[in-house]
Amino acid sequence: EADIYQTPRYLVIGTGKKITLECSQTMGHDKMYWYQQDPGMELHLIHYSYGVNSTEKGDLSSESTVSRIRTEHFPLTLESARPSHTSQYLCASRSYEQYFGPGTRLTVT
Amino acid sequence: GENVEQHPSTLSVQEGDSAVIKCTYSDSASNYFPWYKQELGKGPQLIIDIRSNVGEKKDQRIAVTLNKTAKHFSLHITETQPEDSAVYFCAARGGSEKLVFGKGTKLTVNP
């Protein structure tokens, strides 16, 4: 069973707001990932990190940013949310096997 | 880079029948092939994986086979049950350290 947590699970906010999606894991994994997914659709990698102070952009361009100050914590920030950011955001971490968190469903009105 | 193709995109079976989902990959350096099950409103759950030094792996009603020569791997679910209904994703990983996912298969098991 994976110990990876995401908060909030659901978020509805207005256009222009700044938001931070939280992701934490208690497994001591160095490698962490953020994916964007529309319901039942493909998983798109938007950010990843291979350790503290390491962050890289993924395959899908995203206006979000990430930070990795602590091993267990990998938050994602949107400075100014727009309706096009409406999606599900999934965090994952791994040693060899990769585990996903439950996701945050974001709706921007 | 790696490219993973997954078929079919939708699959409907009767309860008790078997279901097979197939994936092909392009990078011969890939050596790890996991399968995920995603239920509505949840994150993907790792259900089984296989490494390149193994041809087949089984866990109760679920099995995965790997053909490295042909670069394809498959998920087999036997004696399907309604709770097997979900979206299934295959993935491959090699030297890039990142999983590359297929586009998913929506499996529906009809009672």
Image (cartoon, coloured by chain):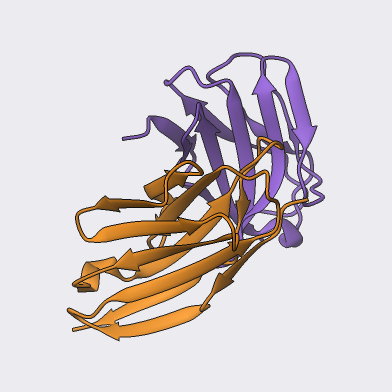
Chain colours: A purple, B orange
Report the residue at 38% width, 73% height from top.
B20
- Quick one: A12 or A35, which is closer to the camera? A35
**Quadrant of the image occupied by residue A33:** top right
Q: Is residue A38 visible?
A: no
Q: Is residue A69 above or below residue B11?
A: above
- Quick one: B94 or A92, which is closer to the camera? B94
Report the residue at 53% width, 38% height from top.
A92
Q: Give residue B24's position: percent from left, percent from top.
A: 60, 64
**Quadrant of the image occupied by residue A58:** top right
Q: Give residue A50's position: percent from left, percent from top.
A: 67, 24
Q: Is residue A46 left or right of residue A95?
A: right
Q: Is residue B32 left or right of residue B19?
A: right
Q: Is residue B57 above or below residue A18?
A: below
Report the residue at 31% width, 58% height from top.
B63
Number of numbered labels in the structure image: 0
Q: Is residue B55 visible?
A: yes
Q: Is residue A97 above or below residue A108?
A: above
Q: Give residue B2's position: percent from left, percent from top.
A: 72, 52
Q: Give residue B73's position: percent from left, percent from top.
A: 49, 61
Q: Quadrant of the C terminus of chain B?
A: bottom left
Q: Is residue A8 left or right of residue B109?
A: right
Q: Is residue B21 left or right of residue A74?
A: left
